[in-house]
């Protein structure tokens, strides 16, 4: 009479058979006819998409809050950072639409306040935030934005004892890649902002720069 297989062999065989069954069934498509009525109802349906997170509108506290970064002690890095920042800002203004939509004007307005709040030099950010409060960003057109940026830049230059830039040349110094007539509009607006910076404004001149008031075109 043959001997029965050892109990351990039976257990191992059962485990191997179970593993083979799991692997085999997971790699083969299930026949819909073999499903129950409840399973058929949900078979092949795509899972419900997850709702997209709501995008909240920036609050005044976020846009106009205190500067975030601390003091920057490295003077060399501070100067390099300043040159790079002004290049970004002036180029942004030079590339801004000449006839922006209200949404585009407001986007540039909020960008300037957030740029100041997140500026890596804390003491520089504080001073720039004061300038923004006194001279709100002018975002009604490309020329007014470019003239405003030049005017504010000259306020910083004056505080640091640096030469005052001729804002009538701002369109040539920071190339917008636009047509000549558009550059002329930037130059004309820049000349007006330069008069404000130098205190040469007469009552007959119109000015693009507002002080302590709502943003133009925002």
Image (cartoon, rainbow, N blue to C red):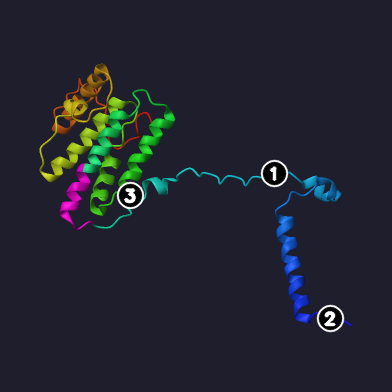
- Is residue 109 shown above or below 66? above
Specify whether 48 is left or right of 64.
Answer: right
Q: Callout 1: 10 Å neighbours few (<14), some, many (20+)?
A: few
Which residue is disc 3 drawn over? 118
What is the span of residues highlighted in magenta in the rendered image?
Answer: 72-83
Is 208 drawn above or below residue 43 in the view shown?
Answer: above
Residue 194, quarter of picture: top left
Judge from the rendering whether residue 98 lies leftward or rightward of residue 127; answer left or right.
Answer: right
Secondary structure found at label 1? loop
114 left or right of 34 in image:
left
Q: Earlier in the sequence, mark 3 or mark 1?
A: 1
Is 80 in the magenta?
yes
Cα distance in 3D space between marks 2 and 3:
80 Å
Residue 4: assigned label: 2
> Residue 12: percent from the left, percent from the top?
73, 74
Q: Look at 22% across and 30% down and name the residue there.
A: 174
Which residue lies under the disc numbered 1?
46
Mark toward the start of the polypeptide (1 vs 2): 2
């Amino acid at each position: 009479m043959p001997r029965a297989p050892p109990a351990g062999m039976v257990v191992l065989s059962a485990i191997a058979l179970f593993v083979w069954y799991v692997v085999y069934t997971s790699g083969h498509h299930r026949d819909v006819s073999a499903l129950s009525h409840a399973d058929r109802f949900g078979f092949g349906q795509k899972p419900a998409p997850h709702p997209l997170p709501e995008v909240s509108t920036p609050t005044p506290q976020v846009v106009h809050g205190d500067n975030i970064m601390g003091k920057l002690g490295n003077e060399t890095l501070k100067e390099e950072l300043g040159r790079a920042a002004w290049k970004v800002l002036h180029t942004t203004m030079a590339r801004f639409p000449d006839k922006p939509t209200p949404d585009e004007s407001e986007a540039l307005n909020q960008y300037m306040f957030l740029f100041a709040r997140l500026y890596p030099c804390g003491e520089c950010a504080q001073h720039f935030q004061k300038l923004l409060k006194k001279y709100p960003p002018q975002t009604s057109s490309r020329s007014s934005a470019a003239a405003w940026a030049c005017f504010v830049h000259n306020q910083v230059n004056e505080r640091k004892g640096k030469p005052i830039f001729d804002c009538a040349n701002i369109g040539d110094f920071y190339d917008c890649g636009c047509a000549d007539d558009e550059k002329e509009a930037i130059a004309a607006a820049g000349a007006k902002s330069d008069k404000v910076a130098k205190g040469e404004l007469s009552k007959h001149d119109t000015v693009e720069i507002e002080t302590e008031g709502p943003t133009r075109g925002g």
